[in-house]
Image: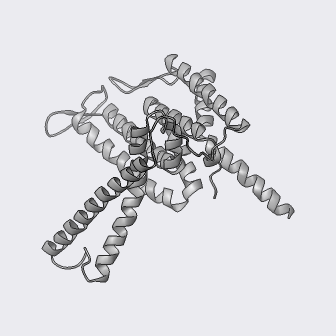
Amino acid sequence: MKDRFTHYHPLVNFFYFSLVIGFTMVLNHPLSQGISLLCASIYGIQAEGKKAVLFCLKWCLPMVLLTAFINPAFNHEGLTILLYLPTGNPLTLESILYGISSGAMIATVMLWFLNFQRVITSDKFIYLFGRIIPSLSLVLSMTLRFIPKFRQQMELVVEARRSIGRDISEGSLLQRVGSAITVLSIMITWSLENAIDTADSMKSRGYGLKGRSAFSIYRFEDRDEIALAFLGFCGLFLSVGIVASAFGFRYFPDIRYMELNAVTLFFQFVYLILCALPIVLNAVEEKKWNYIHSKM
């Protein structure tokens, strides 16, 4: 399925992810965390299908469980004592719930950054920040491109070594370690050479020089103005909600939260609309194409 949101202006894309990632890290209310996690997962599934599902199962779920177990071992705050550990420290319900909340936040941020990496490509990042911070934008752009290129190159190296009988998974433990070190050495050399080539190429093209023109395929259209205004409204409205404690939720020393009423639920509803914006755009686009296809 095509991601409709990627066709919006890079400024709209970047502003959207800045808002959702920022609010995901700030809001610790379980309902807000559930909204963000659900929308990030659905958006990833819409765009990448099974790949996003496997990512959730492989990384996000273990992250939540890991923090839920680790946090009570170091954090003993809370009034609801469940039992005492062999060390004599109490195991509290608040510390367990706070660990689950922290793990959910980390997993949700990882999912949003996965979507961010797919939508905000290197050319979009350079378009946004190339003239403001040319050196930093180049480094960040190279970083965004480095991970998928590194993985592809490593697969090629491993496959090439497998074809000559030097697979990492074959031989004794010492031989496998030696093969893995060789692959790591090859990848480090390739990474350094690739970085030097890219830097020399950009320098030869005059990147970062004052007055240098740049070709751009992005145009700020009416839909981008509407989307940017909507995002600005959501960001301002939710910021007011944070100041007014509409998303208030605390774990220590005991669990207390703002009562869910018409006002607080409306703030949560606006947050839901913000997080679900790409999902709605994709659903509307798919429905439109299905309607056109049915008329052909």
Q: Is residue 22 toward the left or the right of residue 74 in the image?
A: right
Query: In the depicted view, which residue is nearer to us: 149 or 280?
Result: 149
**Which residue lies most toward the bottom here?**
164
- Residue at image coords 67%, 44%: 280
Q: Residue at x 59, y 54 (%)?
A: 46
Count up the numbered dots.
0
State whether residue 116 is above or below residue 238: below
- Left or right: residue 166 versus residue 130 is left
107 w.r.t. 32: above or below? below
Q: Does residue 58 appear in the picture of this structure?
A: no
The residue at 52%/48% (across/down) is: 123
Q: For the C terminus, which image quadrant?
A: bottom right
Measuring from the top left, give residue 232's x and y in whole percent.
61, 27
Residue sitting at the far right: 295
Q: Is residue 118 above or below residue 150?
A: above
Quick check: 32 left or right of 197? right
**Residue 64 is drawn in which quadrant?**
top left
Q: Position of residue 13 (x, y in %)?
A: 57, 40
Q: How is the image coloured?
A: one colour
Residue sitting nearer the eye, 80 or 45: 45
Q: Nearer the viewer, residue 137 or 41?
A: 137
Residue 119 in view here: yes
The image position of residue 164, as x and y in percent, is 28, 83
Q: Is residue 18 left or right of residue 76?
A: right
Quarter location, residue 97:
top left
